[in-house]
Image (spheres, grey):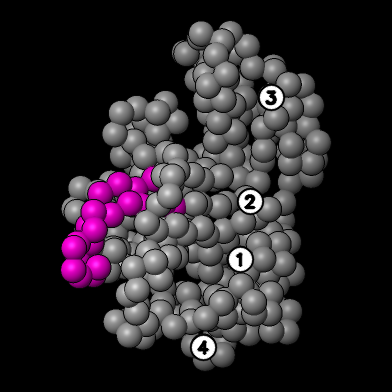
Amino acid sequence: MPWNYSDKVLKLFMDAVKGETGTHMGELENPDGFGEHGSIVCGDTLRFTFRVERHLTDPTRDIITQARYLTFGCTSAIAASEALCTLLEEQGKTPIEALQVTNQDLVDFLDGLPEQKIHCSVMGAEALQKAVADWASKRGVDLVELFPELAHGDEEEGRIVCNCFSVTEPYLRRKIKELGLQSIAEITNALKAGGGCTVCHHTPGGLQDLLDEIWGVKPAGQVEVAASHIDEQPSPYRLGQQIEAAIESVVRPLLQDEGGDIELVDIKGDKIYCRLTGAPGQSASTDQTFKLLVEQQLKEQVDDRLQVIAV
Ligand code: FES
């Protein structure tokens, strides 16, 4: 599915994958704050690190001076991560102030994100929160005393509600309330949960039961909206057609603009085997940039679970 991205999202993404000066893709060695959110198995993951200038006597007045990220995700995940790093560095925030950065701040910085991509901004805010918790434990700051609402324990230990994306009940309960999510579609857009096989939608203890328990029972019409997602899963034949169409209409012209080209070799499940040719300079880093570009475009145009293997 082609997404309607703002110019800002596209520019941040292109600058980041090209490694332009001032972008933030990477990882800091021995960071003051380290946080991860998501899972590579589920398609999106973000590792976030930051460094501070330490205040001599009061750690709560440390200032974030550098922020970096690594993400396995789509265009919007990269752009949202860039937005997060830029906001923190440019505004010289303390880690405590950084906790006030919400996913909506990232969406605003990006001049908006498609509804179905809101989870990319949520991922950034969650990784930031974990990195600040890491900084606090290293600097002896009691975050829970300052923000009692952060005392939510290890949410990864709870019952898994959505197996496709390994999303637990405690995490879902917190985020449904925090983000005011009212429907299964909103949960999927913000957290990805429910965006795969759909089994967790109406199973006992599933997403609808959680929504009903938190907000009260919803009108019956909502069930149909969530169930219609089943028909969106393409067959292998249809998936192959969509991939070929995306390569011809978007990917190949993009590579040819940069002096390269692509040959589709095979498709096995969600793995796309491609031969990438003619990369300028033929260096390993350029090959990697091309592979990343192809993968991002196929995720955007077809399905964000696709992986590109260069052969
Ligand atoms: S179990 Fe939730 S989408 Fe498959």
Q: Separation of disc 1 and disc 2 at Cα?
A: 14 Å
For mark 1, give the secondary structure.
loop
- Highlighted magenta segment, given as a residue range: 48-68
- Give the mark count: 4
Q: Distance between the residues labelled 2 and 3?
A: 19 Å
Say which residue appears at 69% left-offset and 24% top-offset.
Answer: 310
Callout 2 amino acid:
Ile
Above or below 209: residue 250: above
Residue at position x 56%, y 90% in the image:
213
- The answer to which of 47 and 209 lies nearer the viewer is 47
Query: Could you tell which of marks 2 and 3 lies nearer the N-terminus?
Result: 2
Which mark is in front, 1 or 2?
A: 2
Which tag is nearer the camera, tag 3 or tag 1? 3
Residue 129, labelled with which disc? none
Query: Residue tagged by mark 1?
Result: 193
Is residue 77 visible in the rendered image? The answer is: yes
The residue where tag 3 is placed is: 310
In-front residue for pair 303/62: 62
